[in-house]
Image: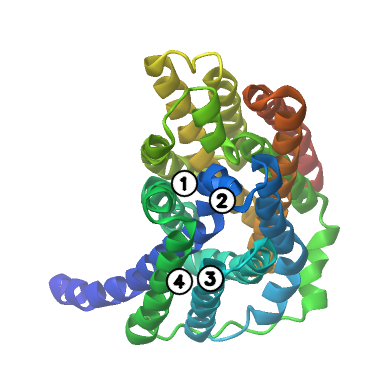
Amino acid sequence: MHSANHARENPRLAGRSLPVLLLAISAFVIVTTEFVIVGMLPSLARDIGVSVATAGWLVTLFAFTVMLFGPVLTGLLSHHDRKRLFVGLLLVFAGSNALAAIAPNIWVLALGRFLPALALPVFWGTASETAAEIAGPGRAGKAVSNVYLGISGAMVFGIPLGTLAGDAFGWRGTFGGLAVLSLLMALLLVRVMPRLARPQRVQLSHQMRILRDPVFLANIALSVVIFTAMFTSYTYLADLLEQVARVAPAAVGWWLMGFGVVGLAGNGLGGLLVDRNPLQATLGAALVLAVGMAATVPLAGNQAGLVVALAIWGLANTALYPICQVRVMRSASHAQALAGTLNVSMANAGIGLGAIIGGGAINHMGVGSIGYIAAAIAVVAVLMVPFIAGITRREAR
């Protein structure tokens, strides 16, 4: 009898795991689209005749678009059929990457970055919520981290290979390849992904009540500071490797791949630790992040030392993605999709701020300064954790 029940449940379990797998593959394409420009900033800047710091504004444009439009778009779309929603989002990425590939100037390229930035937060808010619902209580962190394997996959293969492809075929070829991958994923979702239960529609005004929750707002603020720290340095990592560590431009992609390989371990570790204590996981990862970023420049002249510093940095960097997402979603009493998207939106505020701060630091103090400045911002995040823990305890009474 037990064997029969087990046999009947296996297809059900497989059916539940398939959407998570598809979401992870879609995440790979989406995150590669978002961040591939980071690895190509030096070559793109040279090609269009602007400074690396100026080209960095394309990162800021994407990030601030996510921040400004993400919450409202997710609140309006989160009740739609998930299969159709995900297919539509992948088609937006296909079209916008194609536009970026044929852009005749930086303004059209900026439009090609603006359009997918509208779709990204809707994907992250709904995909994270869907993964958490599939897994059930107590396993949400693991499920979200499984979706976030798409992030690690992008950092291990997507961004570095995009950088290498950009070196071999030009940055336009990289965007063209992403357009094809996005279209392929949309077609696979149509063909393979089963229909999911349509979420109940919740009025946007009701969902927005989480903005009155001090615990939620404090956790959102913490995500902003953490992502500002991360992207003050990560936005210009390729430039740092070229200018400070004297890595040949053709080899930068391989170094970024090594950075991402370590991130695979960080992603799994982050998903495991956040289920136990989200705030403690945040504190520990932010401390490790600060150490890795600060150590990179002084160790840049020693290849073995540079590898160790980048490994520490990469481990914490990727771990903080699922840690921040789950921590914020748990701090919200309702409207999980909106909570997840607000975290992605405000994290992108941090990404945009980080790109601005890092670009300013490069212009005034040189690229070698960004690791120290980013580490100082990470320390601010560490100092925020006890304060947020106090707010959480007070509100729980």
Q: Which label was assigned to residue 47? A: 2
Q: Is residue 161 above or below residue 195?
A: above
Residue drawn at point x = 49 percent, y = 75 percent: 94
Residue drawn at point x = 45 percent, y = 71 percent: 179
Q: CA distance from mark 3 to mark 4?
A: 11 Å
Task: Find numbered disc 4 in the image and state the secondary structure of the residue it sits on.
Answer: helix
Residue at the spot of label 4: 179
Q: Is residue 200 above or below residue 52?
A: below
Nearer the viewer's eye, disc 2 or disc 1? 2
Look at the numbered discs 1 and 3 and tell me whether their residues touch, using CB distance below 8 Å. no
Q: In the rendered view of the protein, which quadrant contains the N terminus?
A: bottom left
Q: How far from the left and from the top, in percent, is residue 56?
A: 66, 46
Viewer-closest of 93 and 48: 48
Task: Find numbered disc 1 in the image and state the secondary structure of the residue it sits on.
Answer: helix
Task: Find numbered disc 3 in the image and state the secondary structure of the residue it sits on.
Answer: helix
Look at the numbered discs 4 and 1 and tell me whether their residues touch, using CB distance below 8 Å. no
Nearer the viewer's eye, disc 4 or disc 1? 4
Q: How far from the left and from the top, in percent, is residue 50?
A: 67, 46
Task: Find numbered disc 2 in the image and state the secondary structure of the residue it sits on.
Answer: helix
Q: CA distance from mark 2 to mark 3?
A: 14 Å
Q: Is residue 178 above or below residue 358?
A: below
